[in-house]
Amino acid sequence: MRVLVADDDFGSRLVAQAAVEQSGHECIPAADGAIAWELYQRYRPQVVVSDLEMPGMDGLALCRAIRAAETDSYTYLVLVTSHGSQDAVVAGMNAGADDYMTKPLDPFTLHTRLLVAERVTSLHADLARYRAALAEQARTDPLTKLRNRLTLAEDLEQLRETAEHAGEQFSVVLCDVDYFKRYNDLYGHQAGDAALQAVADTLAAQVRQSDGVYRFGGEEFLIVLPRQSPSGARAFMTRAFEAVRGLGIAHTGNPPGVLTLSGGIAACTNSHRVSVDTLLHEADLALYGAKASGRNRVMVSRPHTAGLAVHSGK
């Protein structure tokens, strides 16, 4: 572990440093609270052993600053007092300390505190990893491993704000697997799941690194294309549709005989700045138009002309 020792008394600091290093840990010495705070922010040690009474920033202020600055990591704080009064101990615990020791510092006692600190900080590190994994799972579709609608809402709003500030455009494409209910009825839900995974992998392989592919729900996917015009999005969908058809997934309930997609494109441009909800609604209407026109095609929403431009994906 990395252990920060803060004490304005040189002798006490030297004893603590020797005990830390003999316990097999790295020691970062600090001659007062202000220096300790600077070193903490630079090195983020797992443990801080601080004298209670120091000039400038004392041990209580240092504890409070560290607790306020923590994010996912946890720092084990040990306060060292020249007197073990109950008031001093309670004040330290209220400031965020985990334990306390009294002077003169006993190396063996510090060694035992470091054993406890190692155990506690290790548990907190495990919890941080579990929380990160759970957060990732909450934003990932378990079947396709694509990002889900929770992530989409956050990403789209951020993209809309960034694009508006920079004067850029972006497009979204809402896709739907054609006659997917028939596919499940004909081949079973296990085959349906495998088909969705194959479509997801194919769409993800087509996009740029800056683009995003999301499981929108059921057999629907949404593709986000930053700095992409509607015509550019349509060209992308032509390639993506060809790639999906190229999988050759048999679908006798679909007129082409293989699995295909329909898609609707909506764009946010300098002349058409709309909310995320409106943009998704426009893409949904365009998708509905593509399906009503025979499926296996993409349509581009053109809200200014109250019409839809059709482009076959065949």
Image: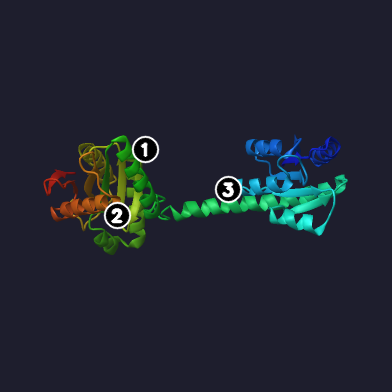
Point 14% across, 56% down: residue: 292
Say which amino acid is labelled 2: Glu
Which SS class for mark 2?
Answer: strand
Quadrant including the N terminus: top right
Residue 314 seen by the camera: no
Of marks 1 and 3, the one in the foreground: 3
Q: Residues within 10 Å of mark 3 (few under 14, many from 20)?
A: few
Residue 244's x, y, as percent? 28, 45
Depth order, front residue of 148/56: 56
Residue 179's x, y, as percent? 23, 58
Which SS class for mark 3?
Answer: loop
Depth order, front residue of 46/102: 102
Depth order, front residue of 12/284: 12
Residue on which disc 3 sits: 71
Q: CA distance from mark 1 to mark 3?
A: 28 Å
Vertical side of 306 occupied by 226: above or below: above
Q: Residues within 10 Å of mark 2 (few under 14, many from 20)?
A: some
Point 21% across, 43% down: residue: 272
Say which amino acid is labelled 3: Thr
Point 81% across, 49% down: residue: 81
Image side of residue 197 versus residue 20, left or right: left
Point 29% across, 45% down: residue: 247
Of marks 2 and 3, the one in the foreground: 3
Q: CA distance from mark 1 to mark 2?
A: 21 Å
Q: Which mark is residue 148?
A: none
Depth order, front residue of 68/271: 68
| Direction bottom: furthest residue | 185
Say which amino acid is labelled 1: Ser
Q: Which mark is residue 220?
A: 2
The reply to whether discs 1 and 2 touch (Cβ–Cβ < 8 Å) is no
Q: Which mark is residue 210?
A: 1
